[in-house]
Amino acid sequence: MKLPESAKTPTMYFIGVTTGKSSIMTLFPHWAKILGIDAVIKGIDLPLHADPDDYRAVVDFIKHDPLSLGALVTTHKIDLYHAAKDRFEYLDPYAVMFSELSSISKKDGRLEGFAKDPITSGLALEAFLPDGFWDKGGDAYILGAGGSAISIGSYLLKQEKLPKRLIVSNRSPARLTAIEEMFRQINPNADTEYYLAPEAEQADKILSALSPHSLIINATGLGKDRPGSPLSDQCLFPQGSLVWEFNYRGDLRFLHQALEQKEARGLYVEDGWIYFLHGWTQVIAEVFHLDLTPALFAAIEQKSAELCGRA
């Protein structure tokens, strides 16, 4: 793995898989002007489940390079935490609880790690979840058991109003077991179910058993860095449900599956755009030690929509 050259100007990094395809590369300079930041952004691409030595090398580079100020981590949040947690002088309670890192920053000579997704996923969900949604008796079904699934599930389990059931499925058993243990600690009284679903048809079956007015979330990463969907094209979404694709770029097959059924099934369909904005702005605020006011977020949201054709 080739590390970036030493930064010549204050630099924030984006640690992912296909970082060059992200809208942040276009948006960051405009956000920097709004926020009064004199800095640039650079991507660091690593393969899925990279060698632990590579994660440690990236963290060490950021830690010791004077003008490298921090990073947002996506896709690698859990693997990077396990490989390099000993490099940090401070880890926030969410990072320790969920064994993941989405934000790397420096403060008073310390390297600090945060798991911001429990905050950002909640902010994004509340931006479009209708008032009284859970009064209709719907379930929440999270496809995937990685960092994003942990974050949104933990947020849901801490709310006063809960879904009738919180259901999680995953293609491999290890992370499914880990998320089950975690969620039971967060809310042992919640009605939760966990299913191993290595094939799309198995996820379809779980989907078909959901109550109407449920929340269905693609937290697998499929459809962004890797093409496809965790569901098959024969899937049937429950009537009147809210379908949330965490991704905003890629082939977004899960999103299109929902859109194809939107009118017939009375669905509300949301992509990952607002999640993307909250995710990035929360980490930028941490890296640059900013007060991200509602007015600043609104200005960023408006400018981003204009630049990306979403206005």
Image (cartoon, helix red, strand yellow):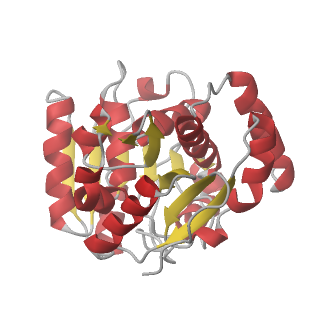
Spot occupied by residue 110 in the image (x, y as percentages of width and height):
37, 39
Quadrant housing residue 25: bottom right
Can you say whether 45 is above or below 163 in the image?
below
Q: Is residue 249 left or right of residue 75?
A: right
Task: Please give the count of numbered marks on the rendered protein.
Answer: 0
Q: Is residue 8 left or right of residue 154?
A: right
Q: Which residue is at the front of the view, 232 or 123?
A: 123
Can you say whether 279 is above or below 83 in the image?
above
Do we see residue 195 in this rendering? yes
In percent of the image, x 54 and y 71: which residue is there? 4
In percent of the image, x 57 and y 45: which residue is there? 275
Spot occupied by residue 256 in the image (x, y as percentages of width and height):
61, 66
Q: Which residue is at the front of the view, 131 or 124?
A: 124
Spot occupied by residue 8 in the image (x, y as percentages of width and height):
66, 61
In percent of the image, x 20 and y 29: which residue is there? 187
Q: Is residue 89 left or right of residue 125?
A: left
Q: Which residue is at the front of the view, 277 or 136?
A: 277
Which image quarter holds the N terminus?
Answer: bottom left
In percent of the image, x 46 and y 61: which residue is there? 236
Q: Is residue 59 left or right of residue 267?
A: left
Q: Which residue is at the front of the view, 97 or 123?
A: 97
Can you say whether 188 is above or below 178 in the image?
above
Spot occupied by residue 234 in the image (x, y as percentages of width and height):
46, 73
Do we see residue 220 in this rendering? no
Q: Residue furthest bottom?
A: 1
Quadrant housing residue 151: top left
